[in-house]
Amino acid sequence: MPSPNIDTIVSLAKRRGFVFPSSEVYGGLGSAWDYGPLGVELCNNVKQAWWRWLVYERDDIEGIDSSIILNRLVWKYSGHEDTFHDPLVDCRECKVRLRADKLALPAEAKTDVADLIRQKQVKCPNCGSSDLTEPRPFNMMFRTTLGAAADENDPTALAYLRPETAQGIFINFLNIQTALRRKIPFGIAQVGKSFRNEITPGNFILRTREFEQMEMEYFVRPDAEHFKLVDEWVENYVEWFKGLGMDPRNLRLHEVPKEELAHYSERTVDIMYRYFPERPEEERQWEELMGIAYRTDFDLRSHSSKSTDGEGTRSNPDSTEDLSYFDESTKQRFYPHVIEPAAGVNRTVLALLMDAYSEKTNDKGETRVILKLSPQLAPIKAAILPLAKNKPEIVGMAKAIKRSLQPVLRAVYDDTGGIGKLYARQDEIGTPFCITVDHQSLEDEAVTVRDRDTWEQERIKVSELAEHLLKRLKPGVPGHAGS
Ligand code: GAP
């Protein structure tokens, strides 16, 4: 069963409470989305799996949660004030705003997009007009002002919402290295919101102005094999995505060409996901899921008070710290180099939903949606369903089972329909186990556990239920998506 298109996921997400269009009662807010009861659980499970994998299971990575609003100078010296631009183009005819680097160019065009626009060879994708303005740089950082009395135009009050979580890590490098007595190589991980005033947001949660990142900065020696480390982290992440349940056929690598690298990067490999399987051209089916960059020592050096340029002039007169590292074993002082795997929570969630989506037809010829999420990521792990909701003993027993499971795993009680409907609802949201309590349960203290993917049923003693479920919920248990 091929992955569906994004529209199928948008409608499932709204119907079942994963993701809603934001501010809908006021007509919405272009490309902003709210995560509902199931969406927030799924996002949390992805973030927790990532944190466990990097911070808990490895011995060389620490965690941090830095501010979203940082001193404006961070963004000056990180290069974002000067270079975090997208090329903006306006259509004079229909007034739509476009990104020059995303415009479709005539086949085999050799000159750059600005020339082609001047020569009227580029058409507006909205209205077909070729009356477009020349590209001009548009800084994507969201601006705000700090302080109650701040005048909007007061440059001393200007601040930005962070466009990447990475800078909060760089400026804390020395704090963490010394407080935790870390030796290089080691990494610092952060998960949190980032903001970019995207010119053309869209495609559901793929490109939004407010999104969540899971970033890790891995600090290594200047003479480490940086390109090889990039390859290693690419491989680690591909394995991690596969472990979460992504189909490897929907993943591929893209070596970012030199001329498209971000200002800090010497090499970047993107892991791409097939978000648009319905598109006829293979090339246009793929979009970035995450990137792994070799950022050199660019950031630590730029934020350092002592760093100098080629002529010996101090390049950062505003910083009060030197973020260099002293290597005891070699007695050398240097600015560590950085390998950065930067992933998006929202793009990961979208890819997981697309890969998990499947349809199955039952004996009666009815087609049902089954969301084959890896059990470790499923928003609800077990649904407790009484077979007779007018029988107080059965209802009481089902509710007691729900309460007893809740400290161990996320469980819900539901008696709002016939059993067929209740199963179908849980399949559609990816609940790996449905537990039915029936008349016999009152006698033998046992319940029926139904598997989401096989629809097979097993009788399990209530006293052994929690252990049984926990064993089957563990990542790597055969028979489940993501194992
Ligand atoms: N610190 C490096 C950095 O931020 P990036 O490639 O610009 O690199 C990393 O962003 C990841 O963040 C992307 O691969 C994507 O998953 C996610 N991301 C970036 N912009 C996004 C947006 N507008 N909406 C949703 N996710 C986004």
Image (cartoon, helix red, strand yellow):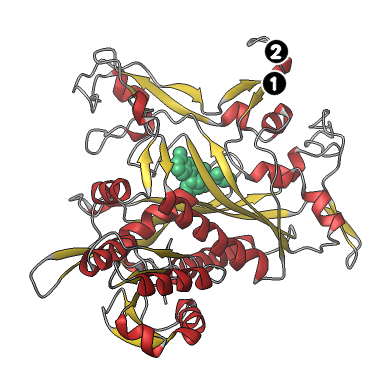
Q: Amino acid at mark 1?
A: Leu
Q: Determine which residue is flagged by label 1.
A: 146
Q: Badge 1: how crowded within 10 Å, few (<14), some, or many (20+)?
A: some
Residue 196: image x %, image y %? 51, 33
Q: Amino acid at mark 2?
A: Ala
Taking the spot 23% from the left edge, 19% from the top edge, the residue there is: 130
Cα distance between the residues tagged 2 and 1: 6 Å
For this orientation, the residue located farthest to the bottom is: 444
Q: Looking at the rendering, which quadrant does residue 369 occupy?
A: bottom left
Element on which disc 1 rests: loop
Residue 56: image x %, image y %? 66, 68
Question: 252 or 479: nearer the eye?
Answer: 479
Does residue 454 lie above or below 142 as drawn? Answer: below
Question: 320 or 253: nearer the eye?
Answer: 320
Which numbered tag is attached to residue 466? none
Residue 244: image x %, image y %? 44, 67
Element on which disc 2 rests: loop
Question: 60 or 283: nearer the eye?
Answer: 60
Taking the spot 30% from the left edge, 81% from the top edge, the residue there is: 439
Taking the spot 22% from the left edge, 33% from the top edge, the residue there is: 106
Q: How many marks?
A: 2
Residue 261 visible in rendering: no
Q: Badge 2: how crowded within 10 Å, few (<14), some, or many (20+)?
A: few
Determine whether label 2 and label 1 are within 8 Å by CB: yes
Image position of 50 (left or right of 377): right
Q: Determine which residue is flagged by label 2.
A: 150
